């Protein structure tokens, strides 16, 4: 297989690729209520069925496991195979889009739509990368399987369902993070603090509502103090990139403190919240600003605030360096909590670490550097991908260096050139891994 053969085929199948991707993009695959034969709702299941229909049209063997995960396969070895694991479910579309969220719209050389980056575009690109190899009759000695999940955004409970019937890949990747190859993912803690307010000062808060979601930095909040209404506006960003957002939870505390809108223990709490979290994304306000050479600084994101009778519930996520243990974080946190506060761990995902010298990573580096001309030194991430749930998997692509905060936002996009470059990278890589 020559470079000319691949490049010519890439140009030839581009319209077909875009047409296939559009079919999947047009399905609203936000998680819904569990029903018979659709454990994550009708949308994700519909996207899975349509994707496997597309794969069958391209000539691949397909299978659905427990109505949760499907795959398209080239080759006959069901026990020793290269796996590419992506997902078809998407986060809620939100509001204020300039384009239809559940479609694929090309404007100014960029494609727009919920899931074009996270993760329908990249995983469908891998399907067509494998299709190119099939059409070119490239001699693969290894079976390659493209795996389509439907619950990545809500905790990856689909992967245990897959593994209950199928062997894991011998090795492979998920195209759901960034380039270059990601050999480590930071640990994640989801924490909840419940603080009791004893002096009735919370009664002055007569209205409180925000757009709180674990996956993002919240950006809108309305509240009233003694029936005087206020609105707070922030900037939405992925929860693993709090530094590029503006968090309305901490902006709310700032407003309460600086304008002295409340009194008593409520004001004390607001002071603590403002002092501990506002613009202190590295955890320095809570004495948990750990870092290491492998993965950098800790990242801290408050994502939910609730008022329940005389209690305040604060939820936040922590993404901590790969060499740090959660016990050190919890120990330091417990020393700086407000009075009468209980701490609970609601979510826990240990760090992952993959051998940087593995032959797969070496090939990823070579392909990435050859096609992009960029430095391919492996990296770590604050993100959480299927690599935490599926054995022998690391993240590889689709975002290039400097691209941050696009997924989970309104007007989610992917430059047309980036999408096609991803297709080329994955085609070359699968050819090498399957040799």
Image (tube, rainbow, N blue to C red):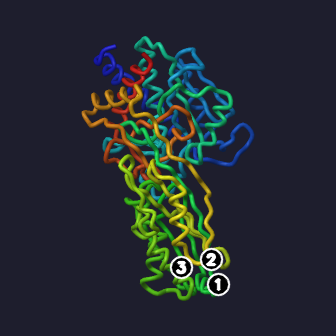
Q: Which residue is mark 1?
A: 198
Vertical arrangement, residue 38 with respect to residue 131, above or below = below
Residue 151 visible from this viewpoint: yes
Vertical arrangement, residue 274 with respect to residue 227, above or below = above
Mark positioned earlier in the residue sequence (2 or 3): 3
Residue 358 percent across, percent down from the top left: 41, 28
Which residue is pictured at 46% across the width and 87% down the height?
A: 260
Q: Nearer the viewer, mark 2 or mark 3?
A: 2
Q: Is residue 431 left or right of residue 8?
A: right
Which residue is pictured at 68% across the width and 31% down the height?
A: 164
In this view, the residue in front, 266 or 52, is: 266
> What's the CA distance linking mark 1 and mark 3?
12 Å
In this view, the residue in front, 104 or 325, is: 325
Query: Dot 2: few (<14), some (14–19), or many (≥20) neighbours within 10 Å?
Result: few
Secondary structure state at the residue bearing disc 3:
helix
Q: Is residue 57 left or right of residue 38?
A: left
Q: Residue furthest right?
A: 36
Mark positioned earlier in the residue sequence (2 or 1): 1
- Quadrant placement of the C terminus: top left
> What's the CA distance linking mark 2 and mark 1?
9 Å
Secondary structure state at the residue bearing disc 2:
loop
Vertical arrangement, residue 127 with respect to residue 310, above or below = above
In this view, the residue in front, 325 or 234, is: 325
Cβ–Cβ under 8 Å for marks 1 and 3 = no
Secondary structure state at the residue bearing disc 1:
loop
Q: Which residue is mark 3?
A: 269
Q: Is residue 52 left or right of residue 284?
A: right
Q: Which residue is mark 2?
A: 340
């Amino acid at each position: 297989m020559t470079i000319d053969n691949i490049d010519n085929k890439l140009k030839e199948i581009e319209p077909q690729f875009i047409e296939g991707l559009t079919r999947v993009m047009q399905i609203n695959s936000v998680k819904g209520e569990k029903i018979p034969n659709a454990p994550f709702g009708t949308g994700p299941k519909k996207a899975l069925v349509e994707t496997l229909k597309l794969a069958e049209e391209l000539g691949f063997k397909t299978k659905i496991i427990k109505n949760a995960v499907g795959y398209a396969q080239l080759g006959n070895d069901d026990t020793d195979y290269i796996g590419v694991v992506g997902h078809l479910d998407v986060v809620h579309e939100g509001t204020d889009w300039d384009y239809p969220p559940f479609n694929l719209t090309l404007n100014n050389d960029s494609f727009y739509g919920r899931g074009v980056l996270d993760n329908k575009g990249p995983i469908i690109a891998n399907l067509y990368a494998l299709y190119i190899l099939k059409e070119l009759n490239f001699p693969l000695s290894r079976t390659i399987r493209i795996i389509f999940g439907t619950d990545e955004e809500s905790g990856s409970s689909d992967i245990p369902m897959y593994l209950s019937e199928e062997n894991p890949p011998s090795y492979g990747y998920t195209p759901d993070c960034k380039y270059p190859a990601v050999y480590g993912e930071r640990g994640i803690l989801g924490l909840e603090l419940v603080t009791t307010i004893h002096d009735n000062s919370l009664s002055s808060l007569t209205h409180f509502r925000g757009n709180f979601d674990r996956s993002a930095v919240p950006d809108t909040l309305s509240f009233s103090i003694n029936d005087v209404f206020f609105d707070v506006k922030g900037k939405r960003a992925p929860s693993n990139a709090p530094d590029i957002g503006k968090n309305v939870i901490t902006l709310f505390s700032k407003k309460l403190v600086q304008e002295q809108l409340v009194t008593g223990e409520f004001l004390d709490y607001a002071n603590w919240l403002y002092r501990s979290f506002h613009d202190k994304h590295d955890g320095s306000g809570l004495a948990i600003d750990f870092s290491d050479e492998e993965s950098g600084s800790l990242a801290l994101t408050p994502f939910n605030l609730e008022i329940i009778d005389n209690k305040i519930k604060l939820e936040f996520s922590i993404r901590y360096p790969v060499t740090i243990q959660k016990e050190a974080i919890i120990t330091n946190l417990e020393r700086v909590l407000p009075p009468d506060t209980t701490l609970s761990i609601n979510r826990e995902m240990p760090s992952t670490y993959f051998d940087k010298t593995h032959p797969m990573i070496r090939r990823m580096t070579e392909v990435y550097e050859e096609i992009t001309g960029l430095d391919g030194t492996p990296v770590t991430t604050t993100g959480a991908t299927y690599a935490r749930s599926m054995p022998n998997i690391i993240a590889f692509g689709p975002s290039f260096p400097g691209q941050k905060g696009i997924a989970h936002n309104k007007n989610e996009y992917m430059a047309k050139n980036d999408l096609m470059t991803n297709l080329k990278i994955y085609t070359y890589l699968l050819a090498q891994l399957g040799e």
